[in-house]
Image (cartoon, rainbow, N blue to C red):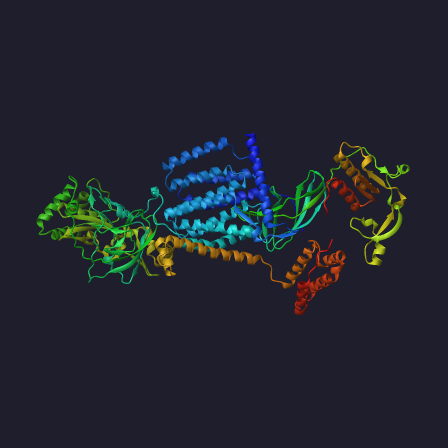
Amino acid sequence: MNIHTGRYTASQHDRQSRLLWTLTAVVIINVPHFLHVPPWVTATLIAACLWRYLLEVRKRKLPSAWVRVPLVFAAFAAVLASYRGISGIEAGSALLIIMLALKLLETKQSRDLTVVTLIGWFLMFSVLLREQEMWAIPYILLGSGLALAALIQTRRAGPVLKPAILLRQTAVIMLQAAPIMIALFLLFPRIESPFWALPTAGSSARTGLSDTVNPGDISSLSQSDAIAFRVTFDGAVPPPADRYWRGPVMGYFDGRQWSWGDRGLRASTAQRSSAEEPVYTYELTLEPHGRQWLLALETPLNWSDEKAFLTLDLQLIASQSIGQRIAYQARSQPRAPSTRSELPRYLGAMKFLPQNSNPKTLQLARQLRSESVSDSDFIDKVLSKFRTEEFFYTLTPQRLGANPVDEFLFGSREGFCEHYASALAVMARAAGIPSRVVTGYLGAEQNPLADYWIVRQSDAHAWTEIWLNRRWVRVDPTAAVAPERIEYGLEEALSDADITVGRAIMGTTLISQALLSWDLVNAYWNRWVLAFGPEAQQLLLGSIGIKEPSKQHLIIFMIVALSIIIAILAWYLRVSITPVNDPVRRYYDEFCRRLQKAGLIRRPDEGPATFSSRVGQQRPDLRAEVGIITHSYLQLRYENFENNAAQTDFISRVKRFRPRQRKG
Amino acid sequence: MIVGTAVFGDLRRRLAQRNRDWLKKRQGPDGLSVTLHRRRIYILPTKAGLMYGAVVFLLLLGSLNYANNMGFVLTFLLAAIGLVAMHHCHNNLSDVTLTFVAAEPVFAGQDAQFEFVMDSHGSRWQLELGWDRGTEVTVDAEGNERVRIRLPLPTKRRGWIPCTRVGISTSYPLGLFRAWAWVYMDLHALVYPQPVATQAQLAPASPDREQQGLRGLGDDEFSELREYRRGDSIKHIAWKSAASHGRLLVKEYREGGQMPLWLDWNHVAAADTEARLSALTRLALDADKNQNVYGLRIPGAVVPPSRGKQHLHHCLRELAVFGTGGKPE
């Protein structure tokens, strides 16, 4: 048995080991950042880590303030120059990484290493602001585990732990923390509106529909396999020709591009539905796109998000930008009657064309209109022009100049959906017919492994709506040029040369199977983990009988749940250190306690026999009884383990044993 | 300014004393063996713990603002780790048994060593033991191992010095919380006077025996056998008789072969009482080293001539407690 004397002072080996653990944790936490920040930021952090470690190994002094302070300014300037500012998640992360690197150069004590670890956790959070894929969970667990291990090592008042013991301690803490974390995740009251404005996405703009349509926008979007949203139909699934997912409506044309303008006027009356036509009910999990519009199957009748509203041009608009994945239910009727009165001013605006732009198109339109008997006839003539003449449907059309519609109709004659939709709308306006361009998605791919549908960015589409016979009518000019696009999707409609390599690979069944399985897992992830918000929380509590919980209810419920978990944890910890229940031992301890009260204290180095003989010498009056009790204790302990009669006798003797304090 | 600091310092001292008294009253005095129950363990976050809490709070604000579920996962994981760490910290201290073993006497100026043993069920980590001011010893106790601990207490004066209280604390596992407990055992260590060399000679009982400073063991006259006592030299054990009697017997020598030396208060020239005691201490140590038979004669106490460790301790104890009123052992 060693005698412990003296306070712990850190050895060279301890310091080195602590530093190494902390550096490892910090570097691994930052790996996802390395893919996004400029290379010099990564290089700075790695260099700082290596430099610091070398200084420790070689027992050199840390760089003085004369070196560090200029480095801080230089790094700050470099971040400013790289990002033209320090606002936004990307620039903020880069700045934090640089600060961390420079902090490393002045870490002397374990307290400094603690600060480094805490900065590491901030950086992990900034990774999570950008990346929410499923790997975020293993990333959080691995990164936090390493940081935790580093913290255990650095905060230890004692020599560093061996890796096996360290890992066990880390794992125990993580495992015990897990249920508390889950309870907090499910029950902590969520808020619906942010405290402060969300920084704009900056350079990390997300793929998705835009609030303007330029020739070439949607064709470039179509080359992305990214998911736009996933849909689960409750009951019937609409036929392919009715799978128009309505997004932003473009009503303003400046001669070159169509734009969204504003989010439009809120519709004052509910959308009417027709009793004969089918209604589809579905749940949609929308990927974040940073804009305010929601996607819905045409024409939305009602939806679960109470703050969202329908505009006069039938766009579904959310109360704020979609910065996170959200899920909502909706009901739509593709063939809903769209007769409604429109404001004359609005219809006037939908007829507006800028002067002096696309003159040839205007002339052609006026000519065709004069040849037509009605507005509908005019539209048919335009469509048959697209169908009968040499127009091509391609993902890679020529670039167009100042009068894109003229150049398209009379020059290149090749284009994607937005070229045709735009040309048709301009022709209609030139003929005095109100028209607008609608963007959204067309189609959906079913995941055969589960009952849900995937809509990708490659399904992005643009079509036209024309005011005919006092109602808005959807006219999809792409159908005239490439009818396969509507029925069978993009790949069928494109020539082979247009299909990119990536999409060709997806065609092989095995890989596409694997990709679909992966997407299934991701879909569950998105639906049940990432889209867990205030509404899902209410649903969860509702399902266990707490209807319409208020914030106060939630807080009380959370505290109760946490108390229960912590009580279980505390009980578990206690149980693990309580000795086995041994009545013989317990009563012998009681016996010693009674003797102690009488002033006879068993020294720690005394065995029962020596203690008994010493008591016998000091207190002859107790010699007999103490001798008997000690003797039977030793018998029960070391010779005769399971003698119940002897045990009962021993216990009753101890109970009767009441030594008195010696007088005087 | 200086007055202000002094007032504040005084106030702080008095508050600290009050706090100590209150704690002691609340817990009551302790026996020589104390098991730390949950009710006497205190716990508070450390500076690092407050920093950690601030980080968790900021992450919570960020997660709420961005409605970022992965952010929530990280935030709540950290919060849960903090809670778990708090429980581990508290548990690490509870049910630890601290038992006093002994405090070996030392000379003034040396550190008195209070020896304890610590028992626990299960492993304990980073236990820090000390007096009022900070940690003296850091211990890891793996498994059910019994741990021996020696706590040094610096001494200046001779006599019985009390230990104020034993602090036992831990910041295991993450250093975010510190749990501690105070143990008020009634412990004293004996501090001998500091030995100081002197010119004084040992005074023999009779002037004509003055030359005989040294004496050989073989010259002694064997007188009797007696029971073994702690401190007796192994050389004096009568192994043959011990074997036949079944207990340890020691040969006793009559000191008649030689006149004993007297360490006499009045024979030592010194400036004051303390110097005199120091000188007598030195003389006693020398006499013991030379294996003389010696006695001690100071005002109020006389130790009859003898020799051996036990005797030396007896003499030194009389010197240590001289004029202090003593304290029963």
Corner quadrant of residue B248: bottom right
Side of A649 where A180 appears, left or right: left
Q: Position of residue B75 (x, y in %)?
A: 43, 49
**Residue A515 visible in the snapshot:** no
Side of B53 where A295 appears, left or right: left
Along the line of sight, the residue nearer the viewer: A212 or A514? A212
Number of marks in picture: 0
Above-or-below relation of A500 to A579: above
Above-or-below relation of A538 to A640: above
Side of A388 where B76 appears, left or right: right
Along the line of sight, the residue nearer the viewer: B320 or A383? B320
Corner quadrant of residue A484: bottom left
Q: Position of residue A494 (x, y in %)?
A: 25, 52
Side of A24 where B261 appears, left or right: right
**Residue B271 visible in the snapshot:** yes
Q: Residue furthest front?
A: A664
Q: Residue furthest right?
A: B208
Q: Residue furthest bottom?
A: A645
Q: Position of residue A17 (x, y in %)?
A: 55, 44
Q: Position of residue A154 (x, y in %)?
A: 54, 44
- Residue at (55, 32) in percent of width and height: B4
Along the line of sight, the residue nearer the viewer: A194 or A140? A194
